[in-house]
Image: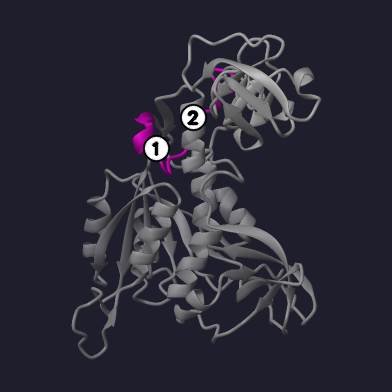
Amino acid sequence: MERGVSLERAIELACEVPLARGTEPVSLDEARGRVLSSGLASKVDDPRFDNSAMDGFAVRAEDCVDSCTKLEIVGASQAGSANLPVVGKGQASRIMTGAPIPEGADAIVMVEDTSVVDNIVTIEGPARPGYIRRRAENLTEGEEALLAGAQLTPASIALAATMGYGEVEVVTQPRIAIISTGDELVPAGAVLEPGQIHESNSHALASLVESMGCKAVRVEAVEDSLDNLRNTLDSLADCDAIITSGGVSMGEWDLVRKLMEEEGEISFWRMKLRPGGPPLFGTWKNTPLFGLPGNPVSSLVVFHVLVAPWIAKSLGYHKEMGPRLSQQVSVRLAQDVSGAPGKLCLRRIRITSENGELIATTHTHQGSGNIHSMVAHNGLTLLPPDADGKAGDIIDALWCR
């Protein structure tokens, strides 16, 4: 077991025991938010044929040089048309948006730039070749347009359909159990007795797990009992990973740490991180287990910087297009922010855009028990160990969602 590791080393050690990665097919109706297991190559050209970007008339540009040119209307092309007219000299075809370009035509005149009497159209505006969408100008058959590890958005689902896919192969959603520990915890909404608090960490962690493309299995809080904790962990054998909250520090009643030391396998304990120093990672009967701190802020912060990257690396998520909770950016500090001796410091900050740059400010008490600070702010500093941030400094930060 390694002690007091850096964030980079913690991620490295955790990734030695990755989540199992499976795949499954899903229909496009079920695909929103899922992650592609492999890239998708288009089965067709897009567009499949030259077509009109406007309602109007398909013409020969050379016939429309003079103003108020009159052309004979020889037919119409509608979206889905199979039988198209042929446009010869001095002729035009009605055409609808998305309809194929008739043979002989090489430009479109918008319907607003025409007038029609009987079977004659008068051209009162420019004939535009640029209003023809050319075959394969968006995609060519065989081109990989959706990448492995990308999360499927409404736009990418539409693109998959355009490319000819009715179903796609996606990463199976691992089941991750979440357990809070502590005698003082009671369910949210319950009446509090003296010394009790509402349990909140499991709800936040379950939401984060789901945001990272996994299935959360939230367990009601476990009392401070080795037997209860052991039995609860054993009952989760069908889950792919376990996240606990609380019980990992150095106290007599930090039972997650104690049970893992005695009966589990620990890869590391404690990190050079503030807030969130006490986490551990290991396995419980071959199931990966993260022991997160019980303080609400520490629990969420450690998930952002440690658990989320582990999930992403395990499941092969694309760095930019896969599920993620934050984006690294550079921000200018509006005020002094203190760092932490020997530790990476993750102060909560509010990031806003002002005059073309990102500005960071602080608005609440920074205590690790103050969950309101995670709502009042939308980012975290990445202050290196032993480094303070001064007003006006540009520093690295995480912009969290």
Of tags 2 and 1, the one toward the viewer is: 2
Residue type of the residue flagged with mark 2? Ala
Q: Main secondary structure of the magenta part?
A: loop
Q: Tell me the crowding category of disc 1: few under 14, some 14 to 19, or many 20 or more residues within 10 angstroms, Cα based.
A: many
Residue 265 in view, yes or no: no
Residue type of the residue flagged with mark 1? Ala
- Mark 2 residue element: helix
Specify the color scheme.
one colour
Of 26 and 204, nearer the camera is 26
Q: Magenta region: which residues?
A: 24-47
User: Residue 29: which quarter of the image?
Assistant: top left
Q: Position of residue 62 (x, y in %)?
A: 79, 18
Residue 32 magenta-highlighted? yes
User: Residue 123: which quarter of the image?
Assistant: top right
Find out whether the residues at labels 2 and 1 contact each other: C-beta distance under 8 Å: yes
The residue depicted at 57 percent of the width and 58 percent of the height is 326
Give the alpha-carbon distance from disc 2 to disc 1, as whole Å: 10 Å
- Mark 1 residue element: loop
Residue 317 higher or lower than 271, as above or below: above
Q: Which of marks 2 and 1 is nearer the N terminus?
A: 1
Q: Position of residue 348 (x, y in %)?
A: 58, 75
Circle 2 sits on which residue?
Answer: 160
